[in-house]
Amino acid sequence: SQQGEEDPQALSIQEGENATMNCSYKTSINNLQWYRQNSGRGLVHLILIRSNEREKHSGRLRVTLDTSKKSSSLLITASRAADTASYFCATAGSSNTGKLIFGQGTTLQVKP
Amino acid sequence: SQTIHQWPATLVQPVGSPLSLECTVEGTSNPNLYWYRQAAGRGLQLLFYSVGIGQISSEVPQNLSASRPQDRQFILSSKKLLLSDSGFYLCAWSWDYNEQFFGPGTRLTVL
């Protein structure tokens, strides 16, 4: 079964609002990554957070990781219409084989 | 800079026909290579990954196979396609075991 479960499955907000997406996983990890996918396109890496980190920022993105709860969240602040896309979390296992296990994704719609 | 190519971009094939999807990476050497499949509205399922020429690991037993004849070339094949093989196929590469860089994908429809 998939390692990552994301919540919510779909999110619709107004431009300027913040968007929060959550990801839960089941086994120990080396790192957790977030990717973005525009419709019908390949995935683009957004941010990576290692298992010994609790929070990371990149521009308008903020990622948190709680290994005790096996969960992560992605916050997009001051959203823009161009942020409309699907967002996936992916976990790299602690055995560090290079394999990523992806969640089912959150579809974000930002209305102008 | 590194780039990753996939072709064809779209493909419509009848059930029972063979398949060959190609992925090539430019601008790097000895990358880890990955094939994923994405069903509509779903996450990615890892199909195969390779850490070197001729080294292929299969994640899900199925109707597909993969080969890596050259360092930066990764091929996904099938001898006889099934309806369930329809989907969006993505190739990716990584230097290490961290972020992966994805190609534009191939949309496969099996009729």
Image (tube, coloured by chain):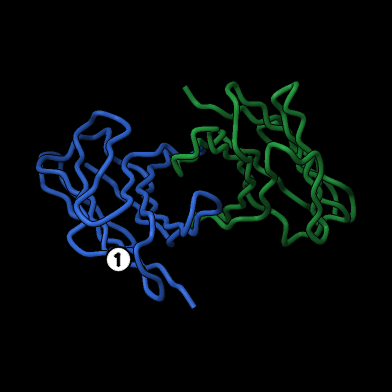
Chain colours: A green, B blue
Tell me the quarter of the picture where residue A52 sits. Answer: top right
- x and y percentages locating residue A79 in the rendered image: 83, 55
Closer to the camera in the image, B55 or B24: B55
- Position of B67 with respect to A24 (left or right) is left
Closer to the camera in the image, A32 or B42: A32
Label 1 SS:
loop
Tell me the amino acid under the disc marked 1: Arg
Q: Is residue B9 above or below residue A5?
A: below
- Numbered circles on residues, count: 1
Q: Is residue B73 above or below residue B12?
A: below
Q: Is residue B104 above or below residue B35?
A: below
Quadrant housing the C terminus of chain A: bottom right
Closer to the camera in the image, A48 or B91: A48
Q: Residue at x 33, y 45 (%)?
A: B49
- x and y percentages locating residue B24 in the rendered image: 31, 66
- x and y percentages locating residue B27 in the rendered image: 41, 76
Crowding at dot 1, Cα within 10 Å, few <14 / some 14-19 / many 20+, comes out as: many
- Position of B8 with respect to B40 (left or right) is left
